[in-house]
Every structure is written in C-alpha cells, then in structure tokens.
Amino acid sequence: MKTSNCFLAQQPGADELYDIAILTPKDSIWPIILWSLLSLVLLIGALTLAISVIRSRKPVASSLSPKEKAVARLRLVQRHSNELNTNEIMLEVSDSLKDYLAEKYNDSLRYETTQEFLTRILKEKTQLPIAAQEELRGFIVAADEVKFGRTPDSHQKCLPMIKVAKDIVNLCETSDHQRNSNRRLITQRE
C-alpha cells in the first residue's frame, strides 16, 4: 500500500486554498519610522529643556567690580540695620569687606581668624595698601568687640562700622589708583 502517494494524488479544490492562508498586503514601514522620529524629536526637546533649566539656575557671573559689589552689600545692610540683630549686621559687614579683599587682592583673609590675620600682616608682606592695613586692623578688632562683646550699646556701634568698611574699600581703590598712576609715570619716563 502506498499511502504517501494518496495524499499527493489529491489536489485541493480552488475554494479550499484560500481557507488555509489569507493573503494580505505587507504592513507599511512608514508608520514605524514616523513614530520613531516623533519620539526622538520629543526626547531631544525634553533634554534641551532640562539642560536650559539647569543652566538658568546657575548663578550668573556679575559684571560688577569688587568695589561695586562690596558697596552695594554694605548699603543693603545699612538699609536693613533696624531689622537685623547686632551679630547679623557685623557678620554681613565683615563678610562684605572680606569678600572684597579676597576678590581684589586674592587675600586669604576670608578664611582666617582675626588673630591669624593680624599675625600674618605683621610677619608677611601683603598686596593690601599700607594705609588700608592699618584701617583694617582697627576695623577687625572693633568688629570682634561688637560681635562678641554683647554690650547694651553694641547696636549703635554697628552703623559707624559700616562707614569704616566703606572707607576701607575707598582707601584701597584710591591707593590702587595712585599706584597705577605712578607706574604709568615711571614707564613714560623710561
């Protein structure tokens, strides 16, 4: 008996052929490409937005000179002196002056205690003008007395200290201007 031949011998009818496999056209690839590109564009847009938000939160470098920054901070403290306690006033005045000197002369005063600064100024030569060093010594000692002395009239002593800080800034600027003028004169003579 030849059973294998009997299956081959029977030919399917025309109606039966379509029941087995339904012929459909191939799916187009264009919707996949379109959705992929749209997803990519949205991803790039979200990434760009995130980067711009992060950059906008960074502090922008100020175009103000060290003197302008210090004087602006001192004026702000002076305006709000009634709202601040003595320690807050003196801390802000001292920090303003220290930041000015650190930025202007690259001085490490910002990170030194009063005693360390006074010792360093006696032993080493600094870029600070001599007249400003003298004023600064007096200011630092007086500021510490006001901050740590806790006397009843310490709040009244704060306002003159703001003026002394402004005077030190102006003294430094004047000394630098004179020093630069003298350098120009010397180079012109040569």
Image: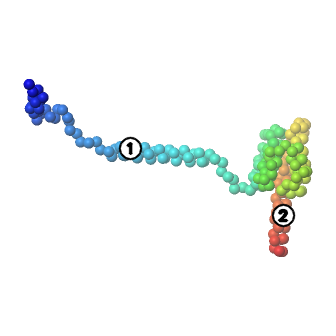
Q: With 145 as the anchor, is 26 left or right in this view? A: left
Q: Position of residue 160 (x, y in %)?
A: 87, 47
Which colour style is shown? Answer: rainbow
In the picture, the quarter occupied by the N terminus is top left
Residue under label 2? 179
Closest to the observer, 80 or 141: 141
Which residue is rendered at x = 43% and y = 43% of the image?
39
Which residue is rendered at x = 28% and y = 42% of the image?
27
Which residue is rendered at x = 67% and y = 52% of the image?
61
Q: Marks 2 and 1: CB-CB under 8 Å?
A: no
Counting labels gives 2
Q: Position of residue 10 (x, y in %)?
A: 9, 31
Q: Residue flagged by tag 2: what amino acid is it?
A: Arg
Residue furthest front as drawn = 1
Q: Identify the element where label 2 is drawn.
A: helix
Closest to the observer, 155 or 95: 95
Classed neighbour count for the residue bearing mark 2: other residues with Cα under 10 Å, few (<14), some (14–19), many (≥20): few
Residue under label 1? 35
Residue furthest bottom as drawn = 189
Q: Position of residue 24 (x, y in %)?
A: 22, 39
Q: Position of residue 139 (x, y in %)?
A: 88, 48
Q: Residue flagged by tag 1: what amino acid is it?
A: Trp
In the picture, the quarter occupied by the C terminus is bottom right
Residue 17 visible somewhere in the drawing: yes
Which residue is rendered at x = 60% and y = 48% of the image?
55
Residue 160 visible somewhere in the drawing: no
Q: Identify the element where label 1 is drawn.
A: helix
Q: CA distance from mark 2 to mark 1?
A: 69 Å
